[in-house]
């Protein structure tokens, strides 16, 4: 007759075998992906080494002779990230309230909101930038719109998940006291999630600053546009200088974001 101890051992062994099988599957998939993409091909890296040396020699020392002309594009990039994040937060919060299962007014609206977030999240901001440049022309405006719309998909999803994990007791108490749906959201839901929403917003702003430099490649303005212009004329010394400027700005934005998070704790 099987004892309780033997039953526990059998279950533990089965669980270990399952975890080992999952880990082995993940390892096989990762190695297969690395092989398919050429990461396990040393000859490929050996062939590329002369080009790497040549390009590195042309990139250094960096050429900062046009630094004064890059200041305004850098400011454009910062403005794009701030405006895009503001659009995202303004649109994400009402959509998230509909996309959260505990605050949605109706299941159909819940599914529509979830579909909208999935749709916006599935289109990369670079593709949105290309489409919007064709619609509204070159400059910072298509970049702001691309960042804002794509961010709605990500920020709205995180907002909705934060709202779904609030403590139900204050919500139930507010409803028992006769509060309307907007009053429940304002007094019982938002106070619980405001710290998380602030963190998500700051993280997204940091990401949007980095993403806005890429959008310049499709004509959406900012320092990314200057980077692509330097690449097109093979001015690699200026390319390295612009990359250093971007690195300094990203470091400053990340530091400012960390300081803002600490101040909100």
Image (spheres, rainbow, N blue to C red):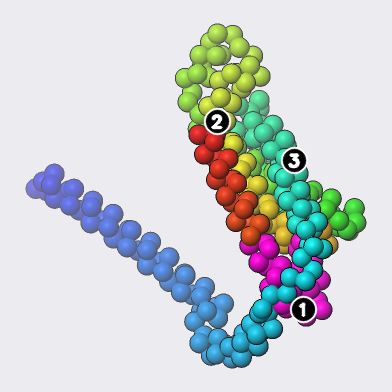
**Residue 221: x %, y % from top left:** 82, 58
Magenta region: which residues?
A: 223-247
Depth check: give the residue in front, 74 or 84. Answer: 74
Depth check: give the residue in front, 100 or 7. Answer: 100
Name the mark nearer the viewer: 2 or 1.
1
**Residue 68: x %, y % from top left:** 79, 62
Q: Is residue 66 left or right of residue 150?
A: right
Q: Which residue is mark 2?
A: 193
Q: Which residue is mark 1?
A: 235
Q: Is residue 62 visible?
A: yes
Of helix, strand and loop, which one carries label 1? Answer: loop
How many other residues sit within 10 Å of disc 2, few (<14), some (14-19) or many (≥20)? some
Q: Are marks 1 and 3 in contact (CB under 8 Å)?
A: no
Of callouts 1 and 3, the N-terminal one: 3
* Residue 243 falls in image quadrant: bottom right
* Residue 181 falls in image quadrant: top right
Of helix, strand and loop, which one carries label 3? Answer: helix
In the rendered image, the residue lying farthest to the top is 177
Q: Which residue is mark 3?
A: 87
**Residue 35: x %, y % from top left:** 51, 79
């Amino acid at each position: 007759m099987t004892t309780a101890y033997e039953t526990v051992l059998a279950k533990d062994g089965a669980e270990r075998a399952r975890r080992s099988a999952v880990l082995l599957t993940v390892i096989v998939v990762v190695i297969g992906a690395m092989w398919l993409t050429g990461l396990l091909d040393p000859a490929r890296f050996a062939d590329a080494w002369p080009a790497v040396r040549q390009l590195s020699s042309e990139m250094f020392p960096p050429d900062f002779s046009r630094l004064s002309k890059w200041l305004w594009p850098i400011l454009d990039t910062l403005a794009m990230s701030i405006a895009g994040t503001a659009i995202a937060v303004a649109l994400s919060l009402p959509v998230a309230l509909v996309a959260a299962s505990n605050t949605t007014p109706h299941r159909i609206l819940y599914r529509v909101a979830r579909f909208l977030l999935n749709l916006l999240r599935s289109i990369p901001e670079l593709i949105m930038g290309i489409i919007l440049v064709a619609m509204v022309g070159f400059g910072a405006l298509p970049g702001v719109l691309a960042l804002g719309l794509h961010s709605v998909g990500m920020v709205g999803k995180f907002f909705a998940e934060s709202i779904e994990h609030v403590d139900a007791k204050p919500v139930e108490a507010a409803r028992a006291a006769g509060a309307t749906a907007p009053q429940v959201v304002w007094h019982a839901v938002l106070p619980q999630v405001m710290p998380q929403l602030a963190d998500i917003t700051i993280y997204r702003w940091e990401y949007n600053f980095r993403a806005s430099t890429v959008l310049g490649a499709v004509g959406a303005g900012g320092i990314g546009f200057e980077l692509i212009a330097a690449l097109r004329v093979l001015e690699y010394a200026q390319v390295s200088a612009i990359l250093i400027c971007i690195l300094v700005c990203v470091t400053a934005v990340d530091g400012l974001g960390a300081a803002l998070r600490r101040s909100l704790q």
